[in-house]
């Protein structure tokens, strides 16, 4: 009977140690899952900014080829996307990055207004060149932000 008591005590201690090990593994798995989710969300942010970069390049092409109705629609698409990204992905963007994206959005809103007013009046060569330069500048800003975000992903998902 004493032997049975020792065996039962050893089994209890073994069960406790096994449960403790399982708890530690579950805790580690939980942390790993949170980190994986954060990396996925940052990757999604990178994809959204890359989408904006592609749309900006398309807008530039439309402006260079005097396709103003399509350029107006593309500018509106970009304005909408850049209105959403800083608020939706806020935890993964610094205040500086949010402000940069919102500044680009504001510049696009101005471009959109100029392009839509072109439907009522002729757009002079100086205005056209300013729009193209502004579009190029915005494209560079977006690409720099994309590079920073992707660089963070390369370092393991850090911002």
Image (cartoon, rainbow, N blue to C red):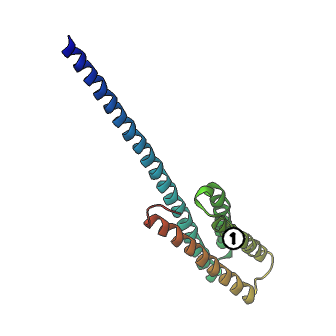
Residue 36: x and y in percent read 44, 52
> Residue farthest to the front?
2
> Which residue is at the front of the view, 66 or 45?
45
* Quarter assignment of residue 24: top left
Residue drawn 35% across and 31% down? Answer: 19
Q: Position of residue 139 (x, y in %)?
A: 60, 76
Query: Residue 33's spot in the image, x, y percent?
Result: 44, 47
Element assignment for label 1: helix
Comparing 48 with 15, the one in front is: 15
Q: Residue at x 42, y 48 (%)?
A: 32
Residue 77: x %, y % from top left? 64, 64
Question: Which residue is depicted at the point 55% across and 62% down?
Answer: 48
Above-or-below relation of 8 to 33: above
- Within 10 Å of disc 1 (Cα), the crowding (few <14, some 14-19, many 20+) is many
The answer to which quarter of the image holds residue 117 is bottom right
Q: Which residue is mark 1?
A: 72
Q: Residue at x 62, y 81 (%)?
A: 136
Q: For the N terminus, give its image quadrant.
A: top left
């Amino acid at each position: 009977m004493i032997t049975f008591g020792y065996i039962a005590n050893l089994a209890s201690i073994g069960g406790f140690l096994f449960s403790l090990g399982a708890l530690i593994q579950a805790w580690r798995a939980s942390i790993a899952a949170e980190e994986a989710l954060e990396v996925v969300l940052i990757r999604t942010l990178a994809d959204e900014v890359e989408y904006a970069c592609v749309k900006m390049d398309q807008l530039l092409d439309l402006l260079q080829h005097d396709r103003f109705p399509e350029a107006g629609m593309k500018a509106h698409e970009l304005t909408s996307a850049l209105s959403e990204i800083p608020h939706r992905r806020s935890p993964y963007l610094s205040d500086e990055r949010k402000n940069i994206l919102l500044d680009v959005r504001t510049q696009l809103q101005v471009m959109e207004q100029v392009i839509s007013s072109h439907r009522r009046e002729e757009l002079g060569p100086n205005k056209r060149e300013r729009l193209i330069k502004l579009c190029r500048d915005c494209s560079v800003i977006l690409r720099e932000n994309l590079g920073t975000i992707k660089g963070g992903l390369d370092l393991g998902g850090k911002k």
